[in-house]
Image (spheres, coloured by chain):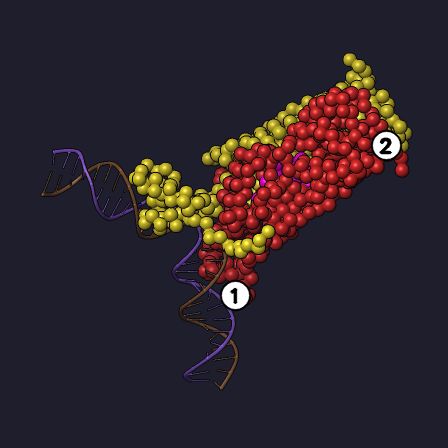
Chain colours: A red, B yellow, C brown, D purple
Amino acid sequence: MPLQRRERPAKPATIKDIARSLGVSISTVSRAMRDFPDVNPDTKQAVLDMAKQLDYQPNQVALSLVTRHTHSIGVIVPNLDYFFATAVRGIDEIALEAGYTVLTCQSNESYGREITNTQRLLNSQVDGLIVSLSSATSNVDHMRRLMTRGVPLVLFDRVATDLDATKVVLDNHDGAMQAVNHLFEQGCRRIAYLAGPPSFSISNQRKDGYLAALRQHGLPVNEDLIIHCEFDQAHAYRATEQLLASGQQPDAIFTVSDRLAIGALLALRHRGQRVPEDVALVGFNDEPVASLLTPTLSSVSQPAFEMGKVAAQLFLEQLNSESILPPRTIVLKPVLVVRESSLKRRP
Amino acid sequence: MPLQRRERPAKPATIKDIARSLGVSISTVSRAMRDFPDVNPDTKQAVLDMAKQLDYQPNQVALSLVTRHTHSIGVIVPNLDYFFATAVRGIDEIALEAGYTVLTCQSNESYGREITNTQRLLNSQVDGLIVSLSSATSNVDHMRRLMTRGVPLVLFDRVATDLDATKVVLDNHDGAMQAVNHLFEQGCRRIAYLAGPPSFSISNQRKDGYLAALRQHGLPVNEDLIIHCEFDQAHAYRATEQLLASGQQPDAIFTVSDRLAIGALLALRHRGQRVPEDVALVGFNDEPVASLLTPTLSSVSQPAFEMGKVAAQLFLEQLNSESILPPRTIVLKPVLVVRESSLKRRP
DNA sequence: AACGTTACCGGCATCGATTGCGTAAAAACG
DNA sequence: CGTTTTTACGCAATCGATGCCGGTAACGTT
């Protein structure tokens, strides 16, 4: 491969260059480019030709300085697992067709990162933020500040109950009830709940649904059957072992996420418990992996893509409205997908 | 909830507001803020105090207009599956500590989207691009144009061989050889390769590695054992069925990705073929799902996180250099992770 | 007392666009 | 042919910052 000389290329052409080489004013070029009525068709054509010839690309930064918006949306998610990746795709979909660019940042479940990301995105003058809070976030003052500054904001999935913002959430209560009802119908009477951290609001909502379903069926609530653990497989594994060792043998486990369900499944398998015969299992999220496990995993399916789309729509709505819209909350419905892990009786 | 009156908040404070309310010039404020030596400590303190009081946030857009860079990196990936999500995390990691913001876009494996994303990001004046090409991209003129325009560019994983750019890639040839060597050692002699689309360069590199390994062991190349298919589970399923029905019964299948391996596994299972006894199976990527399948899936592991980090490092290097650096290619090594799906003999 | 230093600070052009206003030339009108 | 109306375009301010250049005042020096 020959060593070729490389030089910094010329600066990109600006509207000025076009004006100069055509002997017209920059205003005329600007107007021609944006199809204003009061510009001579010939002039316009000349401008357009020259623009193409010079490979002119409008400088959005300069534009943003004038218009005070950047046509970009900042998105902050805790991570990019299946659920969030899908939701971001939904946001992307809507944003793209509305001419917006999406800037995605991961907070990595860290409160500090979330703050940093918020700052960064704002400094980049995004037109607003779509956020799902990190699991480490308990204080939402940073979000509150955004709102007082008038930054359009939409929260989704992991939202803060004590923040009066526009939100898109899942009916977690209902999802949990569906799961527990189904387990009850399968004959399970000692249903455990493998929960997330106690401060995690989604987990608590599902817990409420779980408790409501138990009540509805006249089942007693056994606190020993409710175990909190961190959001990873290893913790779930240990929590499940603990559950089994406690002498409180459950006949079903409902978990707050598929990842935890996987941990539980491995622990059950390790302890020689058959699923679903000895212990039925239902997860939450319906990730693709659910149908690949042995046994295939029943799970409460979230409309992640839809959730992203709705969040983006609400966001754009807010952006395009003259006045500030009162916050509202959209609640989406989950659907239980029944697979082998919870089917004790063939229908 | 009381219906509260909401009004657009005041425009954010600018450097001008600080100057005016302090009775000093804009330049002084600017200097005070940036810790220049030639400014009276008292003045500086006053400026800082006022800045805090007015909740002043510097407008990056204005700054970018002057400095001609935005401290942001555009990243385009085909999708956000496990591999790319991990790589993006790697990019994020490096970028964040260097003070850069990462704007991630998905091309959704579409050539058109890739072009659109490129345009959008450039218009947003990102300082450069880190790209992994979509599977639909065969023409790389858009990337070539970037390079002639002097836009810093790093390609990773899915790169174009006919583009003389900085790249970070995996040694696919070696990965495939490791897989096939391992299968050979397990006693397999009729090893099939479930490939991606014929135009997909990564798939072809792995194919070369596969062929080289066969040659090395003196195994004949049977074209019927090489099947191309689209990158999803359903196609892999059908391709595997076709393979089994062809009368060319393989005793091992090496697939270009885990997702295809899953399709193959399901097809094998459906046809009553035992894995690994009848047919051994090795995938590529080592996604988390690999260890959750039954049997657990052997797979060639890619350092996705590392790849993202290296790509970001090369990018920053390019950005910080005065002259344009000659393109170079970093090759990372894969590692075969052996699990149940390919273990015919206990060691 | 006159001059040079130094410390501080302000004016202004600039980055690349948009946009309101003003106006010359051309067209339409009476 | 004079007047009004259009048409088409230029001028200059503006957005929020940076940074060069130059100026003023308080010192110190001889």
Q: In the rendered structure, the residue with mark 2 lies on which chain? A: A
Share a chain, discs 1 and 2? yes
Above or below: residue A51 compared with residue B311: below
Secondary structure at badge 2 equals: loop
Label 1 Cα crowd, 10 Å radius (few <14 / some 14-19 / many 20+): some
Please name the amino acid that badge 1 sits on.
Answer: Val
Provide residue B81's location: percent of width, then percent of height: 69, 36
Q: Nearer the viewer, mark 1 or mark 2?
A: 2
Does residue A215 appear in the picture of this structure? Answer: yes
Nearest the viewer among A83 and A8 is A83
Name the quadrant of the C terminus of chain B. Answer: top right
Secondary structure at badge 1 equals: loop
The residue indicated by pointer 1 is: A39
Provide residue B110's location: percent of width, then percent of height: 69, 44
Residues at marks 1 and 2 touching, judged by CB atoms closer than 8 Å: no
Q: Earlier in the sequence, mark 1 or mark 2?
A: 1
The residue indicated by pointer 2 is: A344
Marks 1 and 2, how far apart at CA: 76 Å
Nearest the viewer among A171 and B323 is A171
Provide residue A133's location: percent of width, then percent of height: 60, 39
Provide residue A18's location: percent of width, then percent of height: 49, 55
Tell me which segment is drawn in magenta. A74-86
Above or below: residue D25 compared with residue B172: below
Nearest the viewer among A132 and A224 is A224
Q: Residue at x 71, y 29 (%)?
A: A223
Q: Residue at x 80, y 28 (%)?
A: A251
Residue B222 sits in quarter: top right
Q: Residue at x 67, y 42 (%)?
A: A87
Q: Tally the marks.
A: 2
Q: Is residue A84 magenta?
A: yes
Please name the amino acid that badge 2 sits on.
Answer: Lys
